Amino acid sequence: MYLIKQEIDGKDYYPNKNLELSRAHHFVLAYDWLINKNLRLKVEPYFQYLYNVPGVANSSYSIINFNQDWGFMSALENNSVGKNLGIDITFERFLNNNYYYLVTASIFDSKYKADDNVWRNTRFNKNFAINALFGKEFMLRKNRMLGTNLRATITGGERMSPLDIAQSMQNRMIFFDETRAFEQQGSTVYNVDITITYRANKARYSGVWALQVKNVLGCPMGDEYLYNYKTSTIEQPKIKLVVPVLSYKVEF
């Protein structure tokens, strides 16, 4: 961002070279209750205020929402602010009798105001995220152990700007109506991962085999639009990707 180069009257110009750092204030309250030696409950309400965040002048664009854009070449100013308000809840059972579990829930609201002076949802204002983790270990024989782990996640969809259909069809590429930035929200995302591990403990090291299957339910991924040049239509493909990962690790 700082090294973006523009050419004006045949001379190189670095419009973002003197951008200042973004800044933020964080306010957190925490209630931590050790219910017994195996159970713990933690509740954390929080508020975050961001300011001095770079954005594009006279627009709804702010770096708060930056995801990935290899073609970004705009001049920036420190003209945006943001605020995040929410509560995190954690309920945890520590490993005991060869099993453990962890449940976390987060409810939040994330807003920003760019140089157009309008408060909007940020791209990442999913509103909620819930995670559940369960694991159990089985002693097979001396120095051998089998472990199982299940992780489930439910989150709200990521925000997006409405599609500008007329401009997209005319230019044969995707354009969004940035005057209504992030008014739409994608579908809720469900994800389940399963891991099985086999550990062999030696005198001086341990060897761990692990098989992990990510997104085992094949939950569709992606809410992005694409222009299909073959059919001259706008599409929103849904990718279903199940990823198995086999690994071996040596611990000294």
Image (cartoon, helix red, strand yellow):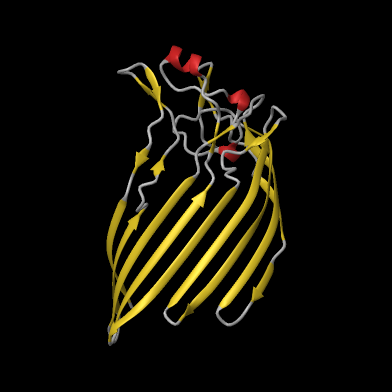
Residue occupying the far front of the picture: 217
Q: Which residue is drawn at 38% across and 36% down?
A: 238
Between residue 123 and residue 141, name the one nearer to us.
141
39, above or below 168, in the image: below
Q: Residue at x 49, y 18 (%)?
A: 165
Q: Count the marks: how many?
A: 0
How far across and down, in percent of the image, does residue 208 sit?
A: 29, 72
Q: Which residue is drawn at 61% across and 81% down?
A: 36
How far across and down, in percent of the image, does residue 119 sit?
A: 70, 34
Would you say 217 lies left or right of 44 here?
Answer: left
How far across and down, in percent of the image, does residue 37 sit?
A: 58, 82
Would you say 94 lies left or right of 85 here?
Answer: left
129, above or below 178, in the image: below
Residue 185 falls in which quadrant of the image?
top right
Between residue 162 and residue 118, name the one nearer to us.
162
How far across and down, in percent of the image, does residue 163 sit?
A: 51, 24
Residue occupying the far top of the picture: 170
Would you say 188 lies left or right of 204 here?
Answer: right
Between residue 32 and residue 81, name the one nearer to us.
32
Q: Which residue is drawn at 63% across and 59% down?
A: 88
Residue 198 falls in which quadrant of the image?
bottom left
Looking at the rendered image, the quarter that the C terminus falls into is bottom left
126, above or below 227, in the image: below
Residue 43 falls in which quadrant of the image?
bottom right
